[in-house]
């Protein structure tokens, strides 16, 4: 029995296929989904979603949204998403280093708005690097 997974952004379908298992970055922690899972609706955080095909795991970066499980169908509606294999480790590492510096600089100041922006950019860059295989 398989779990049908669809990852949808406002402008495209990033993933549409059957998997054996999915792990989502929910706002309350990592959430595993298997076939025959109970109906569920949950918020997603910026992070790495993993799907298992046979014995191989694939990573997708999701940038916040919601996920719904209903009758062996997992629909993930997100602001944006990327497949980990499409991200180069070098680019992801450069983006992560830049985001880390920006966050450190923002945290030295008192502009709360800039701190939040820098924190979000850091989370996105960290997720991209993790999906590219640069972080565990």
Image (tube, grey):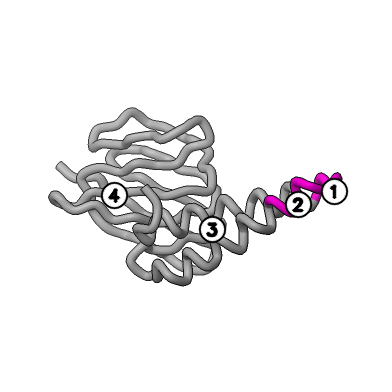
Q: Answer with left or right where residue 84 lies relative to residue 101.
A: left
Q: Which mark is residue 111?
A: 1
Q: Are marks 4 and 1 in contact (CB under 8 Å)?
A: no
Q: Position of residue 83 (x, y in %)?
A: 38, 63
Q: Which residues are magenta?
A: 104-113
Structural distance between the alpha carbons of marks 2 and 4: 35 Å
Q: Read off the residue under disc 2.
A: 106
Structural distance between the alpha carbons of marks 4 and 1: 38 Å
Q: Is residue 15 above or below residue 90?
A: above
Q: Which mark is residue 131?
A: none
Q: Residue furthest right?
A: 110
Residue at left offset 14%, top offset 51%: 54
Task: Name the front one of labels 2 and 4.
Answer: 2
Residue neighbourhood size for the residue with mark 4, other residues' Cα within 10 Å, grouped as few (<14), some (14–19), many (≥20): many
Q: Read off the residue under disc 4.
A: 51
Residue in front for this viewpoint, 125 or 69: 125
Q: Position of residue 48 (x, y in %)?
A: 42, 49
Residue at left offset 14%, top offset 42%: 1
Q: Earlier in the sequence, mark 3 or mark 1?
A: 1
Callout 4: SS: strand
Q: Write down the quadrant of residue 32 in the picture.
A: top left
Q: Earlier in the sequence, mark 4 or mark 1?
A: 4
Q: How many marks?
A: 4
Q: Read off the residue under disc 3.
A: 125
Q: Are marks 2 and 1 in contact (CB under 8 Å)?
A: yes
Q: Is residue 38 above or below residue 74?
A: above
């Amino acid at each position: 029995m398989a779990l049908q997974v669809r990852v949808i952004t406002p402008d495209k379908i990033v993933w549409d296929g059957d998997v054996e298992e999915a792990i989502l970055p929910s706002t309350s922690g990592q959430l595993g989904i298997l076939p025959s899972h109970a109906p569920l609706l949950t918020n997603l955080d910026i992070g790495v979603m993993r799907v298992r095909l046979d014995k191989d795991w694939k990573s997708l970066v999701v940038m916040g949204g919601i996920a719904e499980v209903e009758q062996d169908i997992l629909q993930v509606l997100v602001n944006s998403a990327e497949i980990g294999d499409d991200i180069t480790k070098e680019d992801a590492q450069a983006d992560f280093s830049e985001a880390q510096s920006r966050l450190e600089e923002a945290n030295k100041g008192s502009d709360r708005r800039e701190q939040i922006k820098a924190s979000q950019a850091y989370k996105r860059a960290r997720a991209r690097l993790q999906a590219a295989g640069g972080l565990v």
